[in-house]
Amino acid sequence: MIERWALVSGLLGDLEAYDLIQRDLKKTRGVTSLFVLGDLVGPERNCDALLDRLKNPHRGDLKPDCIYGWWEEQLLAERGFRGERKADALRLSQGEDAVNALLNTVNPSNLNWLASLQFGFIELDCALIHGSSSDVGDNLTSETSPLILLDRLTRLNVNRLFTARSTKQFHLELTGGGINSQVKDLNGKREQQQEVPKRSVIGIGAGLNYTLYDVGSDKTHFLTAGSKTNPKRKGFA
Amino acid sequence: MNHAIISCLHANLPAAKAVLNDIDRQGIDTITCLGDLVGYGPQPNEVVELIRKRGIATCQGCWDEDIIDGLNACECSYPSQLAERRGHLAHQWTDDQLTDENKSFLASLPTSLRRDRLLFVHGSPNSQHEYLLPDMDAFAALERVETAGADILFCGHTHQPYVRELRDGSIRVRLQNADHECDQGEELTLPMRKIVNAGSVGEPRHGSTNATYVIHNDATDEVEIKEVPYDVGRTCQAIVEAGLPKVFAWRLSHGFEFAEQAEDASHVCER
Ligand SMILES: [Zn+2]
Ligand SMILES: [Zn+2]
């Protein structure tokens, strides 16, 4: 079967946005999986309705596979699900009020489900993670040094890394290059040459901006739910 | 000017003394230590006190960290369960022996030291527990040095001394984003960088029983790997007498870690 994935993130409790994406996907041919790469929750609005919909999909919904993101990590840490660690990153960047706002957006009955979500998925030769294997908050963009992008791919030993933390949509391919290295130890010297492997990092966007990925042809399509200029109308085969 | 870098003394006093004598004999007075003052060996207090007395600039090693923070490293630090159990035993013994004063000294050590373009760490800039092995992926190795903003990265932890030069690197990329379908390709030229592993004074695993350390000349950037013989038998005897696992003495008298290699050298402990 030819696989086509839909990749979504950064809903931050916005059920309306999720509903628009589901409507879009219903009109799109051949979508086989829906991955939600974290930040289901956020500090702006009550998130329980969205969490309910994700846990109990409507009839006709593409069933979502979810992982946790930076906001879930902050929430779960503050609620004692991460040992001694608290929502330190959030507290540091946005202060105590932001932490309290976040706590109030999710009913405690949803915490166990959020805590059961995985850090990432490995599908075929692709990794799907909110940030990167280095950190859930790893903010990878098309501006990030290719050396760092390559490192994140190497750590997971995958050919493609789908990331969401930056909220940006991009598909950056490593197409070539190499490096020489010489190691000297007590046994002598040896030279090595290494080529850059053909690998990519894909930023999937956030909120209404989502991504379709055709696994067979390695094509990405950056879409905006509900938008009239939706490129899917161009009809890609 | 020549300066010396030592690492992984591992509570082996005869080895530590022999190496410091060797350095003194050459008239080198700048010494940097990359940690692991304790663990495995039978003289933890003596070695810590020697370093303190000599006022040697030191960063914290994985053992020094674990003695202070407790053993909460994930199993990735150990190549096998057997090795892990032995490690725990040595940890407990070291913890019992060390004086409070020496423990506070270990706790006070920084995780890295920097002098201009030289960076000194125990494992890697990411973690005291990460192994930078000589044959690890060259781009990943370069990333460690480059992200840390150094020209030369001095590390230890693997107990195998080496000098690795990374050069003539480039990465070509092509970008597609939401605004424009496809960008022209771009090429990034990577800088030349070096990783110098100081090996181990007190627990060598490079295939010989000699203690190892390195000398770096900061004018020419030349690096020399030094080997120093010492009375291995005396340390082995002290290990057995202390009731530490006999395999530590066996390893010292062979100079390598038998059949135990860290499985995933690029793994980064995320505890
Ligand atoms: Zn060591
Ligand atoms: Zn170590």
Image (cartoon, grey):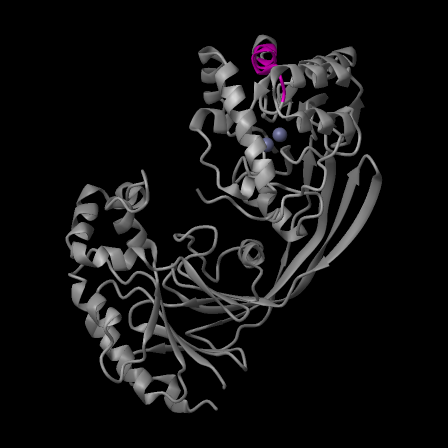
Q: Is the magenta stretch mostly helix, strand or loop?
A: helix
Quarter of the image for the C terminus of chain B: give it.
top left
Q: Is residue B143 visible?
A: yes
Q: Does the magenta stretch include residue B261?
A: no
User: Where in the figure is residue B79, as x and y percent of width and height?
Assistant: 61, 42
In which quadrant of the rendered view does residue A115 lie? bottom left
Which region of the structure is painted magenta?
A: B41-51
User: Where in the figure is residue B67, as x and y percent of width and height?
Assistant: 48, 25
In which quadrant of the rendered view does residue B18 lie? top right
Q: Is residue A226 visible?
A: no
Q: Residue lying furthest right in this view?
A: A188
User: Where in the figure is residue B243, as x and y percent of width and height?
Assistant: 61, 19
Q: In this view, does B151 lie above or below A236?
A: above
Q: Which residue occupies the foreground of this view, B57 or B104?
A: B104
Q: Is residue A190 shown left or right of residue B185? A: right
Q: Residue lying furthest top in this view?
A: B53
In which quadrant of the rendered view does residue B116 lie? top right
Residue at the image position 60 percent from the left and 69 percent from the top: B185
User: Where in the figure is residue B223, as x and y percent of width and height?
Assistant: 76, 31
Q: Which residue occupies the foreground of this view, A223 or B89?
A: B89
Q: In this view, does B212 lie above or below A134?
A: above
Q: In which quarter of the image is ligand 2?
A: top right
Residue at the image position 17 percent from the left and 68 percent from the top: A49
Residue at the image position 42 percent from the left and 61 percent from the top: A120
Q: Which residue occupies the foreground of this view, A142 or B84?
A: B84
Quarter of the image for the N terminus of chain B: give it.
top right
Q: Which residue occupies the foreground of this view, B207 or B53?
A: B207
